[in-house]
């Protein structure tokens, strides 16, 4: 087969790319149905974005390690300045100020910060002497690196993205070897702070999301409408679903946001348990490959960078699936590679490209070169 398939194609990590491509194409089919049986506007733009960001991922995958280390801090600072610019002159949408508009381009800097936080922290712990891992020098600077973007994102307000940044940063800190007692103390402090945050930090609509999560049936036509309709759509799909393009919840507009946050519910109604298993298994294969890349990493920087990217994608997947099933509050987290949206596709493809880059470093050492499987 090596004489038939061109070497640059054969060298790609197909154990990850195959489920990724199948999942994206399946997402396009679901978006086709969500649009009422039309390829536009959702499915077509979904596939175009995937193609564009796949090229970006391949470019990232070819980058040398020294260059990535060099741009780690400048990239973080640049995106942090973009977050400040959002506060100063960002575009409004849905009651939030999250975007920068430059001509036809609409950029959400907080999405770029998700992979950037893992990159910056990996670089920080790579330069920190091992003997300092248990000291304040391993905690305070990293805490500042995380706290600055989290604070700016909370001001937009965007609780879901802030939690994603915090989660990715915490995973990198944990894997860097910080004492477990610090994380237990932080967890205890967080548990104590939850009532205070609910009463004084969360906005009224965010408080309603929490109460709705705890008891969605208390207001099924109001604040609990999203979760209630999502559960109905998922449950009505049964084992094999109602059939492609036959979903009543999305077609009759009972299901809110059937093409973005609740795309899994749209899929489950038409494809049932079988479709859900396909999606979950596909995500599992992608994340498993990413974990193998992290475990095979040759240096602390490589390992932490890869693990941070896996954590970012995992947060997207886990929170969205829990959300649509009523097991987590609705926080506006789309489902990677299936939901319609350029920001989500961009972030997750940046993570994929970075993992492909670390994978190449693993297989070819520090010599660089072409992509390798």
Image (cartoon, rainbow, N blue to C red):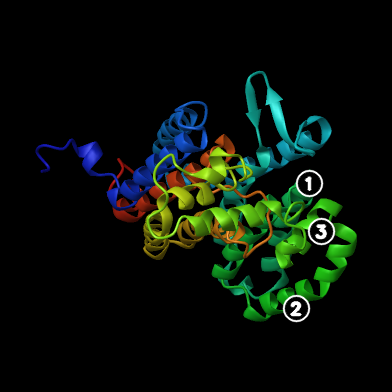
Work out whether 310 lies above or below 110. Answer: below
Is residue 123 something that shows in the picture? no
In the rendered structure, find residue 207 and report the number of the disc placed on it.
3
Q: Is residue 205 left or right of residue 231?
A: right
| Element class at badge 2 | helix
Q: Which residue is mark 2?
A: 188
On residue 252, which mark appears?
Answer: none
Graded by Cα atoms within 10 Å as few (under 14), some (14 to 19) or many (20 or more), the crowding at tag 1 reads some
- Where residue 352 sits in the image (x, y, percent)? 44, 47
User: For residue 347, which quarter of the picture?
Assistant: top right
Camera-nearest residue between 258 and 56: 258
Q: Is residue 79 left or right of residue 210?
A: left
Out of 13 and 338, give the one closest to the viewer: 338
Q: State which mark lies toward you, 1 or 2.
A: 1
The foreground one among 279 and 293 is: 279
Residue at horizontal 62 percent and vertical 50 percent from the top: 333
Q: Secondary structure at mark 3?
A: helix
Res. 157 mark = 1
Q: Mark 1 or mark 2, which has the lower sequence index?
A: 1
């Amino acid at each position: 087969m090596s004489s038939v398939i061109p070497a640059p194609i054969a060298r790609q990590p197909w154990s990850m790319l195959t489920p990724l491509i199948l999942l994206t194409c399946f997402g396009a089919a679901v978006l086709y149905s969500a649009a009422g049986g039309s390829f536009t506007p959702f499915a077509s733009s979904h596939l175009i974005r995937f193609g564009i960001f796949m090229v970006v991922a391949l470019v990232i995958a070819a980058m040398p390690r020294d260059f990535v280390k060099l741009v780690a801090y400048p990239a973080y600072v640049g995106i942090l300045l973009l977050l400040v610019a959002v506060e100063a002159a960002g575009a409004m949408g849905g009651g939030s100020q999250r975007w920068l508009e430059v001509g036809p381009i609409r950029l959400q800097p907080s999405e770029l910060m998700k992979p950037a936080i893992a990159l910056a922290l990996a670089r920080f712990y790579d330069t920190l002497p091992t003997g300092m891992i248990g000291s304040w020098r391993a905690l305070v600077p990293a805490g500042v690196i995380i706290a600055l973007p989290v604070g700016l994102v909370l001001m937009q307000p965007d609780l879901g993205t802030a939690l994603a940044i915090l989660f990715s940063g915490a995973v990198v800190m944990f894997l860097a070897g910080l004492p477990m007692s610090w994380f237990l103390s932080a967890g205890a402090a967080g548990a104590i702070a939850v009532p205070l945050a609910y009463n004084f930090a969360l906005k009224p609509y965010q408080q309603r999301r929490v109460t709705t999560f705890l008891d969605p049936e208390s207001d099924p036509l109001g604040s609990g409408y999203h979760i209630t309709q999502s559960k109905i759509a998922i449950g009505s799909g049964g084992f094999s679903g109602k059939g492609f393009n036959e979903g009543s919840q999305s077609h009759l507009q009972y299901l809110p946001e059937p093409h973005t946050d609740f795309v899994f519910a749209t899929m489950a109604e038409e494809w049932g348990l079988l479709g859900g298993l396909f999606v979950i298994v596909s995500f599992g294969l992608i994340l498993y490959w990413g974990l193998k890349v992290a475990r095979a990493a040759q240096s602390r920087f490589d390992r932490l960078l890869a693990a941070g990217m896996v954590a970012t994608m995992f947060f997207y997947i886990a929170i969205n699936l829990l959300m649509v099933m009523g097991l987590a509050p609705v926080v506006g987290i789309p489902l990677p590679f299936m939901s319609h949206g350029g920001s989500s596709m961009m972030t997750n493809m940046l993570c994929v490209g970075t993992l492909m880059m670390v994978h190449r470093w693993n297989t070819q050492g520090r010599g660089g070169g072409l992509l390798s499987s």
